Image (spheres, rainbow, N blue to C red):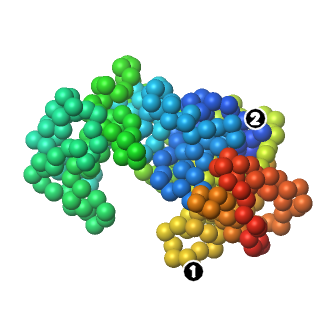
Amino acid sequence: MTVHRLSRTDARRIAVQAQLLDSRRPTDVVDMVRHLTLLQIDPTAAVAPNADLVAWTRIGSSYHPDDLVAALENRSLIELRALIRPADDLALFRAEMAAWPGTREPLRDWEVGLRDWVKANDACRLDILDRLGSSGPLTSREVPDTCAVPWRSTGWTNNQNVIKLLDFMVQRGEVAIAGRKGRERLYDLASRVYPDDPVPSFEDAERIRNERRLRALGIARATGTEFPHEPSTVGEVGEPATVEGVKGTWRVDPAYLGQPFSGRTALLSPFDRLTHDRKRTLEIFEFDYRLEMYKPAAQRRWGYFALPILHGDRLVGKLDATADRKAGVLRVDAVHEDVPFSRPVTAAVRREIEDLARWLGVAVAPPGTVSRG
């Protein structure tokens, strides 16, 4: 098979087009999620919740968060493990659920530990299924804790027995997230939530998921670092490619090869899939980025929730901004320029900031500092 030889410009443009960040905007949130395969849920709302910010970046100011809520309520979209996915794709995860806690033998030690903990609390698991069957959907607070063996963790989930058991029951395909009551998840029997579609074999499902992931990423590695819930790799689907100046081989979706490119300016969520794989971002875009919300303020270079700035096929800087809803303003503390902005780039970034503020229903506060470097 021919190995496609791509320049970095080629690779960047493929990635941008695949993520629906070129000038051809989608218009429907469900169609957008079907193409992207997922929207990540994150409660941080320094600017806006991640799922809404990602949708606004693609669709523009015609997007309204109620559109996403409606799609979740009518179950054309479904929440699975902190990701919003098309309901049509759920069958691709059912074989993996049936094989929980692992799809390959022998199980790893931590998978054995999860299996044994759930088994030790089987009476509580069955009680949860009975309660959901008769009274669901329920929040985790409405489910009594009858676990015989507590969950041990060095993190915030220590002794959060019901929450962890429900999470594993979601992973097993027994329970599903049926909606939300405020910010709390509502759990119900999966048979009431998931479409009753035929379930492919694990091998077929993995191949289809890899194909859809490559369509959404455009270009990716065959193997590499594992990410929770959703890989950044695609196995052997697509066609092999090299990128000038970057070591190793890639897989590329041939549908994007040789396509005309028309870019635009966009402000990206820190969790945006274009930059989610920091190594790929550095290799293809030559863009250094880290989310700094977990760092002490004095150690931050770019800000608490800095938004990567896309212009055409380049990531050119970071926007340090915060939506102060009580004051009714979008505070712009800094625009960090990775390369000096030309006047057209400065004007385009300013328009995006103003559009973001309008979409949020606030005004842009007087400009903060502008830093270069």
In the image: residue 355, left or right of residue 35:
right
How far apart are the alpha carbons under marks 2 and 1?
40 Å
Q: Can residue 247 be seen?
A: no
Q: Quadrant of residue 362?
A: bottom right
Q: Amino acid at mark 1?
A: Ala
Q: Which residue is mark 2?
A: 24
Q: Residue at x 25, y 48 (%)?
A: 141
Q: Residue at x 25, y 32 (%)?
A: 136
Name the residue furthest front. 327
Q: Dot 2 lies on which element?
A: loop
Q: Can residue 34 be seen?
A: yes
Query: In the drawing, what numbered circle is on residue 96?
Result: none
Q: Which residue is mark 1?
A: 298
Marks counted in the figure total 2
In the image: residue 67, left or right of residue 364:
left
Q: Earlier in the sequence, mark 2 or mark 1?
A: 2
Q: Amino acid at mark 2?
A: Arg
**Residue 54: horizontal and vertical position, in percent?**
60, 45
For label 2, the crowd category at 10 Å Cα-Cα, with few meaning under 14, some 14 to 19 and many 20 or more, is some
Query: Height in image: 85 above or below 270?
Result: above
Q: Dot 1 lies on which element?
A: helix
Of badges 2 and 1, the one in the foreground is 1
Q: Residue at x 67, y 60 (%)?
A: 329
Q: Which is more toward the observer, 246 or 290?
A: 290
Is label 2 in contact with label 1 (beta carbons under 8 Å)? no
Please identify the quadrant where the N terminus is shown.
top right
**Residue 60: horizontal and vertical position, in percent?**
70, 41
Please identify the quadrant where the C terminus is shown.
bottom right
